[in-house]
Image: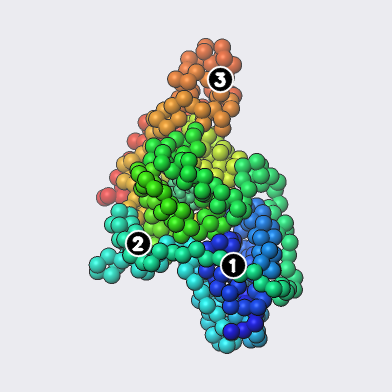
């Protein structure tokens, strides 16, 4: 073994259950963690995540210092930086990231390390089971969730249970790289991110606390509460999971400790299964990151309409439940899953704007953006993906509001213009008589927009457009 080990950190900003870090700390005298910040991945693409990353790296750096591990952040291209490491008394480690571009970088890095005769080793990344292990009997990948998850879960359960991994405290630390930057340098230029500070504390400690609390208090009701955005029925663990502040195997282990594994537990574990499925999809069918998985959708008559797109992004469509979701996203960097489905369906089906526009906007605004879930879910709503919602399933934004936000609590929170609106009209405010609108001093078309499209007409037009694909 060499004296020094470098752990190349990406989506694994944690101390607990971090295979590469744990291994390095037990096998080397000196360990450094290296995070490479490639601004090309973030600028105007993942602005919200710059904030999460900056805060998380700051926390992680101080956590690692407790183990005498120095976290160094370098800015630039991954391969250019990694290939500056020359053969010396050093070994390199990393946990895999299951995104085709990242896999490509890992491949190039491995080729370089082999050529330069540098010792390296990589470990399973933040999924339960390697996607190649989950296949149909004929050796092809699953395209339907239920059989995929049945197979994947069973394979995972058949393995020896995942044992907790810790770090060993080292005797001393060392700085290896020059030009290491301060995590604060990663903050987005626009101060939009400042609002996120009211909602999130991005650290491993908070990830663990929140997960434990969710499992203790709320998972039992998850099956019933997860669809209602006015209550905190879900775990809100997604931004932490994306950045690896908690490993999915840690969550699994915590869930395994539940004594009465009822409906809530089952449903929650199923959602982790959807996450596995998305990862399997983008790795088996990487072409879906660029376009429709179902090629017939290449002929779909999408509409280009910047006015509609902008109204959607700003939460000004005139459909309160849609606008509430979009405003929650902009304000907090997160949106409830029910709303993600509603707003995505509205963009794709009511406005007939390409799902890629929505995917791009989510990518830029979501703190939990993850390539696998985002693309797979956008294509699921569009009907162009694997195991997708059928094209004729067009969410009615009025009924969705009435069903999932009956008392309008969530909607009134994010669309405060309507907070004094009569409840029975909250999800269809244009139906309230003009005289009544004047009486309460909220005029639709003036204080809050009139609907940009009429639901019935938009629905009929969408169905017609989808019919063209069948000809
Ligand atoms: C259009 C659209 C885009 C989405 N984009 C993303 C994204 O970029 N990143 C992301 O993590 N999720 C995405 N999702 C999935 C889902 O909305 C979020 O994972 C969930 O809302 C996160 O909140 P939570 O942690 O409270 O979830 P919980 O309900 O507590 O679920 C726990 C975990 O299970 C996983 N999970 C839950 N639902 C899904 C799902 N439908 N598909 C895959 N995994 C799921 C997530 O990792 C989540 O953190 C998207 C969904 C839609 C409809």
Q: Which of marks 3 and 1 is nearer the N terminus?
A: 1
Image position, residue 29 (x, y; %): 65, 78
Q: Can see residue 159?
A: yes
Q: Which of marks 3 and 2 is nearer the N terminus?
A: 2
Q: Earlier in the sequence, mark 1 or mark 2?
A: 2
Look at 44% across and 20% down and name the residue there.
424
Q: In this rendering, is residue 24 above or below 467?
A: below
Q: In terms of depth relative to the viewer, which is nearer, 5 or 56? A: 5
Image position, residue 282 (x, y; %): 42, 62
- Give the distance between the C-alpha atoms of the residues marked 1 and 2, in whole angstroms: 26 Å
Q: Can see residue 462?
A: no
Q: In terms of depth relative to the viewer, which is nearer, 401 or 129? A: 129
Q: Quadrant of the N terminus?
A: bottom right
Q: Name the residue under label 1.
A: 167
Q: In this rendering, is residue 70 above or below 108?
A: above
Mark sitting on residue 420 = 3
Q: Which of marks 3 and 2 is in front?
A: 2
Q: In this rendering, is residue 289 above or below 31?
A: above
Look at 61% across and 58% down and name the residue there.
42
Q: Is mark 2 within 8 Å of ligand 1?
A: no
């Amino acid at each position: 073994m060499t004296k020094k080990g470098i752990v190349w950190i990406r989506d694994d900003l944690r101390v607990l259950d971090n295979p590469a870090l744990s291994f390095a700390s037990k096998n080397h005298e000196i360990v450094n963690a290296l995070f490479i910040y490639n601004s090309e991945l973030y600028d105007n693409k993942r602005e919200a995540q710059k904030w999460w990353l900056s805060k998380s790296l700051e926390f992680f750096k101080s956590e690692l210092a407790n183990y005498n591990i120095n976290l160094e952040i370098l800015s630039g291209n991954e391969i250019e930086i990694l290939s500056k490491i020359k053969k010396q008394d050093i070994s390199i480690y990393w946990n895999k990231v299951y995104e085709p571009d990242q896999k490509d970088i890992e491949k190039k890095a491995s080729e370089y390390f082999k050529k330069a005769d540098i010792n390296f080793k990589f470990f399973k990344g933040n999924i339960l089971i390697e996607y190649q292990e989950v296949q149909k009997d004929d050796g092809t990948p699953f395209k339907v969730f239920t059989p995929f998850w049945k197979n994947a879960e069973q394979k995972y359960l058949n393995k020896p249970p995942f044992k907790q991994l810790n770090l060993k405290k080292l005797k001393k630390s060392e700085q290896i790289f020059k030009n290491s930057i301060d995590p604060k340098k990663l903050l987005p230029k626009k101060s939009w991110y400042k609002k996120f500070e009211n909602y999130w504390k991005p650290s491993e400690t908070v990830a663990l606390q929140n997960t434990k609390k969710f499992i203790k208090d709320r998972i039992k009701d998850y099956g019933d509460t997860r669809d209602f955005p006015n209550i905190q029925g879900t775990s809100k663990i997604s931004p932490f999971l994306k950045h690896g502040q908690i490993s999915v195997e840690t969550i699994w282990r915590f869930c395994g400790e539940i004594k009465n594994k009822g409906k809530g537990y089952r449903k929650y574990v199923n959602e982790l299964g959807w996450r596995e499925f998305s990862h399997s999809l983008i790795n088996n069918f990487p072409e879906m990151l660029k376009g429709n998985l179902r090629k017939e959708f290449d002929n779909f008559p999408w509409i280009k309409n910047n006015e509609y797109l902008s109204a959607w992004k700003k939460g000004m469509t005139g459909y309160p439940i849609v606008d509430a979701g979009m405003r929650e996203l902009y304000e907090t960097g997160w949106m409830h899953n029910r709303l993600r489905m509603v707003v995505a369906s509205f963009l794709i089906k009511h406005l007939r704007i390409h799902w890629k526009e929505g995917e791009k906007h989510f990518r830029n605004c979501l703190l939990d953006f993850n390539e696998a879930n985002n693309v797979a879910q956008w294509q699921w709503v569009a009907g162009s993906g694997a195991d997708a919602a059928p094209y004729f399933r067009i969410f009615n934004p009025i009924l969705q509001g009435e069903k999932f936000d009956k008392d309008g609590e969530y909607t009134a929170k994010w669309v405060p213009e309507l907070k004094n609106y009569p409840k029975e009209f909250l999800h269809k405010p244009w139906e309230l008589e003009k005289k009544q609108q004047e009486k309460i001093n909220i005029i639709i078309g003036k204080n809050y927009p009139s609907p940009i499209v009429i639901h019935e007409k938009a629905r009929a037009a969408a169905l017609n457009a989808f019919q063209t694909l069948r000809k």
